[in-house]
Amino acid sequence: MAKSFLSSKIKEAVEKTGGDLKKTQKLLMAWALRDNALLLDMVKPHLKAITAVLIEKNVMGGKSEDNASYKHRENPFERRKARCSSSARKDEE
C-alpha cells in the first residue's frame, strides 16, 4: 500500500482523538488489529528489528541445551552495533 494510506489513517486517528497521543496510539492499534493492510504498513519498516528481538528472546534467551551453545557464538547484533559506532566516530572526525 502507498505511504499516503498510512499517513491518512494517522491523521484521521489524530483528528478523532483530538491530538491525544495515547488515545491516538490506542485507536491506531485497534484499527490495525482489524485491518491487515494497515498493520502491514505500520510494521513493514520495522520488521527486521522485530524479528531480531523475537530471535533474541526465543533463541538466545532460551534455557535448553541447544540454545546454550547458540549463546556462545558471536552475536551478529553486537557486530552491527560496533560497525555503526565506528562509522559514527569517523563522521565526527
Image: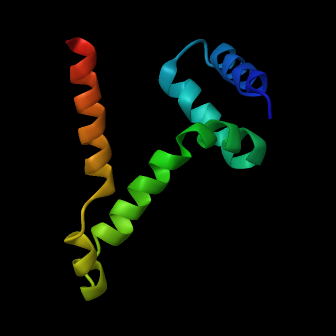
Residue 91 placement, left or right of 53: left
Position of residue 48 in the picture relative to residue 84 (left or right) = right
Residue 35 visible within the image: no
Along the viewing direction, whichever of 51 and 37 lies nearer the viewer: 51
Colour scheme in the image?
Answer: rainbow
In the picture, the quarter occupied by the C terminus is top left
Question: In the rendering, at what x and y percent does residue 53 appear?
Answer: 39, 54
Measured from the top left, where is residue 15 in percent x and y?
68, 13
Comparing 71 with 38, the one in front is: 71
Q: State whether residue 37 appears in this view.
A: yes
In this rendered view, identify the residue nearer to me: 84 or 51: 84
**Quarter of the image where one finds residue 76:** bottom left
**x and y, in percent, of residue 44 in the image:** 62, 42
Residue at x 75% of width, y 48% of height: 36
Residue under the point 60% across and 12% down:
18
30 is higher (above) or lower (below) than 69? above
Q: Residue furthest bottom?
A: 65
Say if 26 sits above or below 60 in the image.
above
